[in-house]
Image: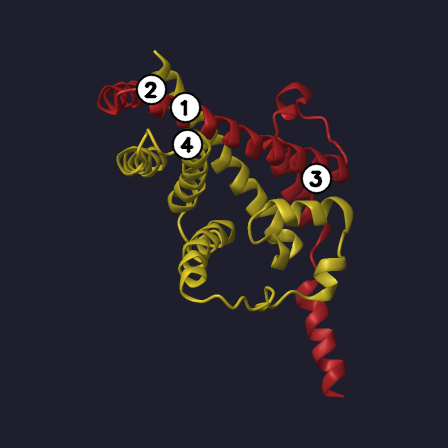
Amino acid sequence: MSSRRSRSRQSSSARITDDQIVDLVSKLQALLPEARTRGNDRVSASKVLQETCNYIRSLHREVDDLSERLSELLATTDMSSAQAAIIRSLLTQ
Amino acid sequence: MLALHFLRALVRINQTSDPSRCIVAQRSRRIKLAAYASIALAAGRRRAWSRAVLCSLHGRRACRVRALSRRRVSSGKKAKGVHPTEQREGGGQVGELRRLVPGGRSMELCTLLEEAGSYIQCLTAQVQLMNMIADSMSK
């Protein structure tokens, strides 16, 4: 008896509405770079998830590449002048 | 906020690394870890992915200390609280997204999609910041 009750409680708390999923997927779609070219056209959830995974992977790769680039620059640049240049560009943004 | 954390970390890395001995790859790894720490700190502890990043960075440091003091390596417990149904749910792309978003393995689908959105926004901001810093230093 108790197991049946706990099972039904579990399923009701885990039930996510389709509207919620559609809403979240469309928000995710808006963040992807392809959204700018595609505009407001609806794409399948599976396609959005695939593009999201691809985009996160490409962002990870960019962080790796930029870390290497910054590491090389740190070795050759005087940090104090670089700091001044960076802060100047941040303030003028 | 993001820029502040990351710039501080860069200054620290530059001060503590000896250019003659420290190879580029080692410094690059430290910069990469600083980048992820910065976005997690900027996002704060209200996001599950930022908590997962900070935990893993903390664990990394703790692991190094443990490895130095103790030779014996225990198998350790895997992440608890992962329901088999959540693992099976969606398979394919959802499973892939769970692997890419920090802490994604134990999230419900709704949470995973929200967290993925936040993670993408923060990663994009970090990449823009790093590009800007690299361009400033290249001039």
Image marks 3 and 2: residues in contact by CB distance under 8 Å: no
Whole-Å distance between the Cαs marked 4 and 1?
9 Å
Say if labels 3 and 4 share a chain: no
Q: Chain of mark 4?
A: B
Chain letter behind tag 3: A
Secondary element under disc 2, as helix, strand or loop, is helix
Label 3 sits on a secondary structure element that is: helix
Report the mark closest to the observer, 4 or 1: 4
Within 10 Å of the Cα at label 2, are there few (<14), some (14-19), or many (20+) other Cα atoms?
A: few
Q: What residue sits right under mark 4 in the picture?
A: B23
Labels 1 & 2 near each other (Cβ < 8 A): yes
- How packed mark 1 is, by other alpha carbons closer than 10 Å (few <14, some 14-19, many 20 or more), is some
Left or right: A4 as drawn, with respect to B109:
right
Q: Earlier in the sequence, mark 3 or mark 1?
A: 3
Q: Colour of chain B?
A: yellow
Subunit of label 1? A
